[in-house]
Amino acid sequence: MAAKLSAAERREGLAQLSGWSEVAGRDAITKTFRFKDFNAAFGFMARVALVAEKLDHHPEWRNVYRTVEVTLSTHDAGGVTARDLELARAIDAIAAEG
């Protein structure tokens, strides 16, 4: 099982990510992505799903038309772990590919 990050470790990890923030009232991180249309948003989600499956670490997400809200937390650790930061970096890379 992955170890939950301390508050300081979580803040340090977030400082290295662009646009990610802590979720109020919960040990999780979140980011909202906006794309040109639904097809681009859905394609992004499909690419993230492949990476998430490979990492065996899956995001919570919500999609409305061209917007995808992603929340990451390691449920069995009870909060944010290094796995969440790794997946956040991979998600950002996928979004940058467009």
Image (cartoon, grey):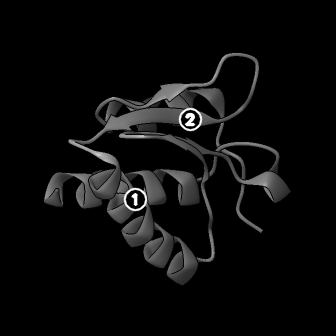
As helix, strand or loop, the secondary structure at mark 2 comes to strand
Crowding at mark 1 (Cα within 10 Å: few <14, some 14-19, many 20+): some
Q: Judge depth for marks 2 and 1 and give the one in front.
A: 1
21 or 67, which lies in front? Answer: 67
Q: Is residue 25 above or below residue 59?
A: above
Quarter where residue 22 is shown: top right
Hey, which residue is sitting farthest left in the picture?
97
Residue at the spot 34% in from the left edge and 60% down from the top edge: 44
Give the residue pinned by disc 2.
Answer: 29
| Relative depth, front residue between 12 and 75 | 75
The answer to whether 4 appears left or right of 75 in the picture is left
> How far across and how far down the image is residue 23, in percent?
62, 24
Relative to the observer, which residue lies in front, 48 or 93? 48
In the image as oriented, which residue stretches furthest toward the bottom? 54
Depth check: give the residue in front, 6 or 73: 73
Question: Sequence-wise, which precedes: disc 2 or disc 1?
Answer: 2
Kind of residue indicated by mark 1 = Phe
Please, what is the three-letter code of the amino acid marked with disc 2?
Ile
- The x, y position of residue 7, in whole percent, is 63, 27
Vertical placement of residue 57 versus 28, above or below: below
Which secondary structure, mark 1? helix
Q: Is residue 63 left or right of residue 76?
A: left
For the N terminus, the quadrant is bottom right
Residue under pointer 1: 42
Q: CA distance from mark 2 to mark 1?
A: 21 Å
Residue at image position (51%, 83%) is 54
Q: Give left or right: position of 70 versus 81.
A: left
- State which quarter of the image contains the C terminus: bottom left
